[in-house]
Amino acid sequence: MSWFPVLVVAGLVTFAIRLSFIALLGKVELPPIVTHALRFVPPAVLSAIVFPELLVREGALDLRPGNLRLVAGVVAALVAWRTRNVVLTIAVGMAALWTLQALVPA
């Protein structure tokens, strides 16, 4: 069996689900509490993706100063807090990580 038809069907189903929500939001007015709650979805999803990469090393929680990703993440968080600029936060965070990786022996 070829995987290509399975991938095409999965892509179409995912597209249809997302499109239905976009089309529905234009025609249905959501309660204020729902619209307020939806504002927290992107930060929650981003946190769920980023925090394990910063905090977990080899399957265990790693809060040591030797965890370069965590140190770079703290630097990026400080930039985000002070500037509220997403592009600058990403740029400084990556620059901090690359600099730390270049300076600290593995």
Image (spheres, grey):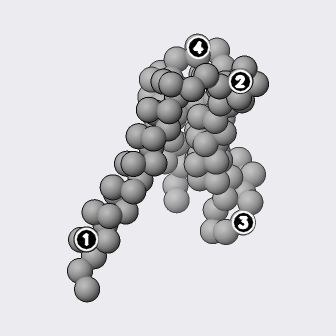
Amino acid on which disc 1 is placed: Pro
Residue at 67%, 59% in the rendered image: 56
Which of pointers 4 and 1 lies earlier in the amino acid sequence?
1
Residue 101, visible in the rendered structure: yes
Q: To which residue does mark 1 refer?
A: 5
Distance Cα–Cα, label 2 vs label 4: 32 Å
* Image height of 81 relative to 48, above or below: above
Residue at 59%, 53% in the rendered image: 53
Amino acid on which disc 2 is placed: Pro
Residue 13 on image: x %, y %: 39, 56
Q: To which residue does mark 4 refer?
A: 83
Q: Nearer the viewer, mark 4 or mark 1?
A: 1
Numbered disc 3: secondary structure: strand
Which of pointers 3 and 1 lies earlier in the amino acid sequence?
1
Left or right: residue 91 compared with residue 11? right
Which of pointers 2 and 4 lies earlier in the amino acid sequence?
2
Residue 48 on image: x %, y %: 64, 48
> What count of labels does the image hold?
4
Kindly identify which numbered label has been placed on residue 60: 3
Q: To which residue does mark 2 refer?
A: 31
